[in-house]
Amino acid sequence: MEDIEEMSIATAPQPPKWWFCCIDNSHMCLRTEFCQHLNSINPNIQFILELEDTKGQGLPFLDTITTRMGNAAESE
């Protein structure tokens, strides 16, 4: 799994701003296109994209809810 993650970051036109992993869970700030790129690395391993809700309630990751402060996902 680590090889797939490293390859996808190294070959991505716009890699994620952050990427946290724990066993089979990943949490990252990315553009939708990166998920498609990530899934193209190995067709036997597919990542599921779960978007932040529109009410700003954040995303679950492990036993926490993560929220974003500011516009961290906007392009620079």
Image (cartoon, helix red, strand yellow):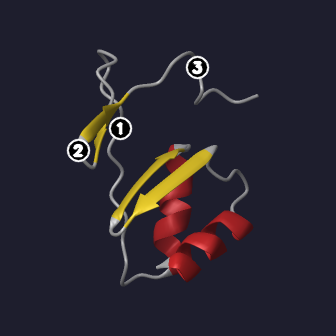
Name the image quarter holding residue 48: bottom left
Q: Nearer the viewer, residue 6 or 44?
A: 6
Residue furthest to the left in view is 63
Q: Crowdedness of circle 1 by 10 Å Cα count: few (<14), some, many (20+)?
A: few
User: Are dots 1 and 2 in contact, CB under 8 Å?
Assistant: no
Q: CA distance from mark 3 to mark 1?
A: 15 Å
Q: Nearer the viewer's eye, disc 3 or disc 1? A: 3
The answer to whether residue 66 is above or below residue 50 is: above
Q: CA distance from mark 1 to mark 2?
A: 17 Å
Q: Which residue is located at x 55 percent, y 44 percent?
A: 30
Number of labels in the image equals 3
| Residue occupying image coordinates x 57% and y 81% | 3
Instruction: Tell me the kind of residue under disc 1.
Output: Leu
- Is residue 6 shown left or right of residue 22? right
Residue 28 placement (x, y as % from top left): 49, 47
Q: Residue at x 66, y 64 (%)?
A: 9
Q: With 55 as the anchor, is 20 left or right in this view?
A: right
Residue where numbered disc 1 is placed = 51
Crowding at label 3, few (<14), some or many (≥20) Cα neighbours within 10 Å? few
Q: Give the numbered dot on residue 71.
A: 3
The answer to whether residue 3 is above or below residue 19 is: below
> What amino acid is found at the position of numbered circle 2 in the picture?
Asp
| Rendered location of residue 42, percent (x, y) | 47, 82
User: Which label lies toward us, 2 or 3?
Assistant: 2
Check the image and name the residue furthest to the front: 63
Question: Where, by quadrant of the figure, is residue 41 drawn?
Answer: bottom right
Please state which amino acid type lies under the numbered disc 3.
Asn
Give the side of residue 43 with respect to residue 32, left or right. left
Q: State the SS at label 3.
A: loop
**Residue 59, quarter of the rendered image:** top left
Q: Depth-wise, is mark 1 or mark 2 nearer the camera? A: 2
Location of mark 2 (residue): 63
